[in-house]
Image: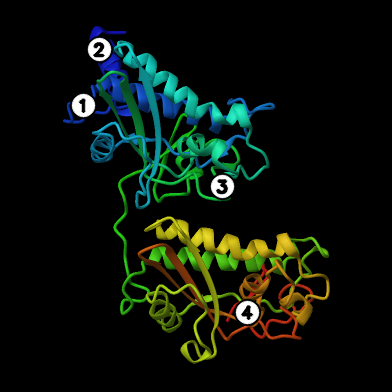
Amino acid sequence: MASSQLTALVLFIALAAANAYKKPHCSNRGMTNDTRDLILSYHNNARRRVAQGKEPNKVGNLHPAKNMYELEWDCKMEQQAQDAISTCSSKIRDWPNMAQNIITWTSFDEYHDLTGNIKTSLNDWWGQAKQHGVYGAENRYTGHSLYSFANMVHSETTKIGCAYKICKGRINTMVITCLYNEIGSLKDEVMWETGRACRTGADCTTYPNSDCSDGLCTKKADVKETNHMCPKNGGMTDRVRQKFLSLHNLYRSRAARGLEFDPLGGKTPKASKMLKMVYDCAVEASALRYAKNCVYEHSQPSEHKGLGENLHFTTALNLNKLKAAREACEEWWNELKNYGVGRSNKLTNELWDRPNSEIRHYTQMAWGTTYKLGCAVVACPEFTYVVCQYGPAGNKIGKVIYSIGKPCSGCPGKCSTSEGLCIV
C-alpha cells in the first residue's frame, strides 16, 4: 500500500474514532474534563452492559434492553448540580422533569483521592440492582432500595450533569450529585424494556431519527414540535396527540384479536366490531378546558356532554408529555390484567362497584363503539395532569364492552385486518 493511502486510512480511522465519542467539555471550573469523562463513561459502559444482557442481577443477569440510550454530558445540568450542593447540602430537590442522585462523605482527614471517592459513589448507586434485585420481565422500579440505580439506568434518559463539593471544617464533608433529564424512580416506572440491544438505528424508536452505537441508541437533536393537527388548541403537540392515539389503538387492537390477559377469563374475547379511534380536536378542546382547572376529580356531565372521561395524575412536576401519555394509558389499561372483566365482557353493576378493583378506565378505553379521542396534558402547580375524553361515551351499565366475534366480521365498512379494527 502506498504511504499516502496508508496515511489517509489512518486519518479516516482517527476521525471515525473521534466522531464515535467526544469527551465532555464545560467552562465550569468546579470539575475537570477528565472527571466528567470518568462519570459519563461509567454510566454509558454500565448501561451498555445492561443492554447486552451482561450486567449481574441479584440472581443471574439483568434482562437485556432494547431502546437503551447513550448519555451525553450537559453543562447546564452540571451547573444546576453545582449550585444545588454549593453549601454541601445533601437534600434531594424537587426538580421539574429531572432526577437527582446524591451521596455524602464525611471524614476528619483531607479528601485526597477524588477519583476513588467518585468511583465508590457510582458503584454504590449502581450496585443497588445486584444487592436488592430487579424482578419481573417488565423491569419496574419497585421501591427506594433501587432509587439511585433506577435513575442511572432509565433507558429514555439522554442527558446527565454531575458535580461535587468539598466543605472543610472540624469534620470535612464531600457531596457528589448527578442530575438526569428523565426520572427512573417513579412508582412502577418501567426502567427499561426487555429486548435485544440495538444493532442499527432502525432498532431505536424512542426518539425520532436515532442511531445505534455499540448496543446503545444515540439521540439526535430534538425535532421541532408541531401543532398542525389541532392548530386552534394550544398546549399540545402533534407528537403527543399521535402517542395517545397510537397507544389507544394498539391496546384496542390487542383486545380485539384476543391477545390480552384477563385474570377472570384467560384471554380477552375477540371483537367483531371494534372501531379504530381517530383524534378529534373538539374533544381535545373539551379535555384541555377541564384539565387547566387542575382539579383531580371527574368533570360534571354538563361539562363533557356525550363524552366519556379518564383522568390520571403524577406528582412528578412538569412531566414530559409523551411520558405522561404513556404512563396514563398504561395505568388505565392495566386495570384489565390487574382485576379482570370475565368472558361475558359485560359491564355489570358488580364490576362497576367492586371495592379496590377499579375497571372503568379500561372499559372506556376498550368500549367498542367509542371512536373519537381527545387528550390533554397540563403542568399543574402540584402535579402533572392527564385528561382524555371519548366520544361517544362508553361505560353503559348492563352493556357489553364490545361485541364478541371474529375480528372485523361486524364492520359496517372497511377493516384494518392486521389490527382487527373497523375503519370509521
Query: Could you say where residue 415 lies in the image, as x and y percent from the top left?
Result: 64, 75
**Disc with the residue nearer the chain's start (2 vs 3):** 2
Image x and y of residue 45, in percent: 45, 25
Going from N to C along the chain, the mark reached first, 3 or 1, is 1
- 343 left or right of 14? right
Residue located beneath label 2 in the image = 7
Q: Mark 1 or 2, which is nearer the eye?
A: 1
Q: Secondary structure at mark 2?
A: helix
Which element is circle 1 on? loop
Residue that badge 1 annotates: 30
Residue in the picture at 28% in, 34% down = 85
Mark 3 and mark 4 lie on one chain; the one further toward the N terminus is 3
Which mark is on residue 190? 3
How far is disc 3 from disc 1 in space, using C-alphas? 34 Å
Q: Amino acid at mark 4?
A: Lys
| Quarter holding residue 414 | bottom right
Neighbour tally class for label 1: few under 14, some 14-19, many 20 plus, Cα within 10 Å: few
Against 368, residue 206 (above or below) is above
Tag 1 near tag 2, CB within 8 Å: no
